Amino acid sequence: MEKKIIIAIDGHSSCGKSTMAKQLAKQIGYVYVDTGAMYRAVTLFAMQNGMYPDEGIREEELKTAVSNGEIQISFKFNAETGRPDTYLNGVRVEEEIRNMAVSSRVSPIAALPFVRSLLTEQQQAMGEKKGIVMDGRDIGTAVFPNAELKIFVTASAKVRAQRRYDELMNKAKTEEEKAALNYEEILKNVEERDYIDSHRETAPLRKAEDAIILDNSEMTIEEQNSWLLEKYQEKIKE
Ligand code: DC
C-alpha cells in the first residue's frame, strides 16, 4: 500500500486553495479538512449568541463558552455535492458560514489565541492517521510543521476578489441577492483579511520555509489541479 502523508495547503483567502485541496483529496482518497470553515463556525456561534455585537467581540464570554465545550464543530460528507458540510453543534451551517456577515467578522475571531488553540488541537487530532489534505493559513507552520507536503498558494488580490464575486454570483438565488453583490466591497474584504491574517500575533499567515509556492493568478482550475497532483505523486515516490 502507498504511504499516507499529510498535505498542508496554506495561502491567502479566496485563492482557490479549497477547490484544489478538495479535488486532490477526492482523487487520491484522502480526507479533506477546510479549517477556515472551523473559524467561520466559531464566528457564527459568537454572532448567534450575542457575543459579537458591532462594538466588538465579548472575549470573556466566548472564552467561557470555549472552555465549557459549548462549541462543537464537525464535518459530514454530503453525497450530493461530493464535499463535506460543516456542522455547528449538530446543525448544518455550510451556507451561513460563507455569507458576507461572517466573512467580514471572521479574521478578528481567528486572531484570538484561545480560539486558535482549540481549533489547532482538533485539527491535529483529525490528522493523526495521516491521509489528509488540510487547507488554512497555519497548517504547514503551526498545525502540522512536519507535514510531508506543504503548498503555499497565492494570487493577486484583484484576481481573488473577482473569483469570489463570480462564486457568490453563481450561488445567488434571486435578482436582489445578485444586485447586492459589490466587487469593490469584496476586494476591500479580501485586502482587509490579508492584512489581519498576516499581522496577527498568534500563528500569522506566512509561508513555511519548506513550502512550495504556487501563484495561480494565471492558471485555470484544471492546471492547478494537475500541478498539485504531480507534486503529490513526486512526494510519495520519495
Ligand atoms: O479560508 P477562509 O477564507 O474560509 O478563512 C476564514 C478566516 O479564518 C480567514 O480570515 C483566515 C482564518 N483562518 C485562519 O486564521 N487559520 C486557518 N487555519 C484557517 C482560516
Image (cartoon, rainbow, N blue to C red):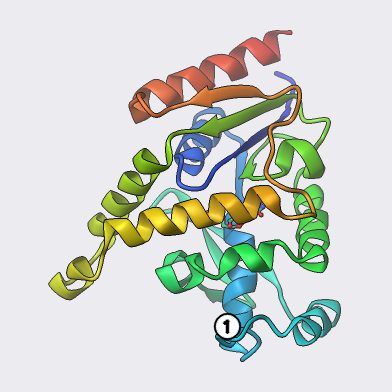
Residue 67 placed where, x, y %? 86, 78
Find residue 207 and report its horizontal and vertical position in percent.
69, 32
Look at the numbered disc 1 and say if its residue's Cβ is closer than 8 Å to ligand 1. no
Query: In this figure, what is the number of numbered marks?
Result: 1
Which corner quadrant of the figure contains ligand 1?
bottom right
Q: Secondary structure at mark 1?
A: helix
- In the image shown, does 26 or 198 lie closer to the viewer? 198
Picture coordinates of residue 32 (x, y %)? 59, 44
Visible in this render: residue 80?
no
| Residue in view at x 36 percent, y 30 percent | 221
Look at 31% across and 46% down and name the residue there. Answer: 162
Identify the image quadrant of the N terminus.
Answer: top right
Relative to 201, is 133 above or below?
above
Along the line of sight, the residue nearer the viewer: 9 or 196 = 196
Where does the C terminus fall, quadrant-wise?
Answer: top right
- In the image, what residue type sits under mark 1? Met
- State the residue at coordinates (57%, 83%): 47
* In the image: residue 72, left or right of residue 194: right
> Which residue carries the number 1 mark?
47
Q: Is residue 151 above or below residue 94?
A: above
